[in-house]
């Protein structure tokens, strides 16, 4: 029993040392090698750190990339009955968005939805004895900015594949049309319409006169019928 606990403690210390270890510069083997100039290492940026695989990074706070143009790309809604599981998955989604290079806002807590039920303890003589039940739905929302639609689709598919049990997600994505889409739509609609090039103002005027004559004839006929009814009465 003691040996097993010692082995588990040793393995825990090894994992901790591996997670917190940094790349050490090897010591010089001789005086001649120490005199050799060493190329300076490139400074690790937050964006490169967020896009790289680092063991144990999930326990740290995610890196939120800054917005570049302020154009909304998608809104992700999360809801669950368990707030700890919900916060865990939102933390996971923030890390995933940072790794894909998607600027994401910090999670916003929406109002908690409450629903109450009152159930009878007994159907007969225990009518006055009732029991209350409550269900709370916790909600979070994050917003993605300045990202390509393909990258947003990749993020949503990744989150749907690795979604935590007991968490629901709904994604609202914006797709923007290219410049000049109105003119192209108008041209396509006019192309499907049967527009005769020989239609002139004369034809339109003749059609209007025909409609006026029909209306006048209908009004005269109605007046004649009213006069006949008055004479007969």
Image: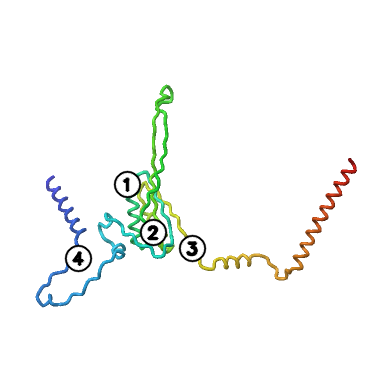
- Residue at the extreme right of the image, as rendered: 231
Residue 68 picture location, percent across and down: 39, 65
Q: Are the residues at dot 1 and dot 2 in contact (C-beta closer than 8 Å)?
A: no
Q: Secondary structure at mark 1?
A: helix
In the rendered view, would you say 175 is above or below 230? below
In the rendered view, would you say 58 is above or below 148? above
Q: Nearer the viewer, mark 4 or mark 3?
A: 3
Q: Secondary structure at mark 4?
A: loop
Residue ID at (32%, 46%):
84
The numbered disc on residue 84 is 1
> Is the residue marked by circle 1 packed among few (<14), some (14-19), or many (20+) residues within 10 Å?
few
Residue ID at (12%, 75%):
34
Say left or right for 196 vs 153. right
Residue 15 picture location, percent across and down: 19, 56
Q: CA distance from mark 3 to mark 2?
A: 18 Å
Q: Earlier in the sequence, mark 4 or mark 1?
A: 4
Q: Are the residues at dot 3 and dot 2 in contact (C-beta closer than 8 Å)?
A: no
Q: Earlier in the sequence, mark 1 or mark 3?
A: 1
Q: CA distance from mark 1 to mark 3?
A: 36 Å
Q: Earlier in the sequence, mark 1 or mark 2?
A: 1
Q: Earlier in the sequence, mark 3 or mark 2?
A: 2
Residue ID at (36%, 59%):
97
What residue does disc 2 label?
A: 155
What residue does disc 3 label?
A: 176
Q: Secondary structure at mark 3?
A: loop
Q: Nearer the viewer, mark 4 or mark 1?
A: 1
- Quadrant of residue 56 in the image? bottom left
Q: Nearer the viewer, mark 1 or mark 2?
A: 1
Q: Earlier in the sequence, mark 4 or mark 3?
A: 4
């Amino acid at each position: 029993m003691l040996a097993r606990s010692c082995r588990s403690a040793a393995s825990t210390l090894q994992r901790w040392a591996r997670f917190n270890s940094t790349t050490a510069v090897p010591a010089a083997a001789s005086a001649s090698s120490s005199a050799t100039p060493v190329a300076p290492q490139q400074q690790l940026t937050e964006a490169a750190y967020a896009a790289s695989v680092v063991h144990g990074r999930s326990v740290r706070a995610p890196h939120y990339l800054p917005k570049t143009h302020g154009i909304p790309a998608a809104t992700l809604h999360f809801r669950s009955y368990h707030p700890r599981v919900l916060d865990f998955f939102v933390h996971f989604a923030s890390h995933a968005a940072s790794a894909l290079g998607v600027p994401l806002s910090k999670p916003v807590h929406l109002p908690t939805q409450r629903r109450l039920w009152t159930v009878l303890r007994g159907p007969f003589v225990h009518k006055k004895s009732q029991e209350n039940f409550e269900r709370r739905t916790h909600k979070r929302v994050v917003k993605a900015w300045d990202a390509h639609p393909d990258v947003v689709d990749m993020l949503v598919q990744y989150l749907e594949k690795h979604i935590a049990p007991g968490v629901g997600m709904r994604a609202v994505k914006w797709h923007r049309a290219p410049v000049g889409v109105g003119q192209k739509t108008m041209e396509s609609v006019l192309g499907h319409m049967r527009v005769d090039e020989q239609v002139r103002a004369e034809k339109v005027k003749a059609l209007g006169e025909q409609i006026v004559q029909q209306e006048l004839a209908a009004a005269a006929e109605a007046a004649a019928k009213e006069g006949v009814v008055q004479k007969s009465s």
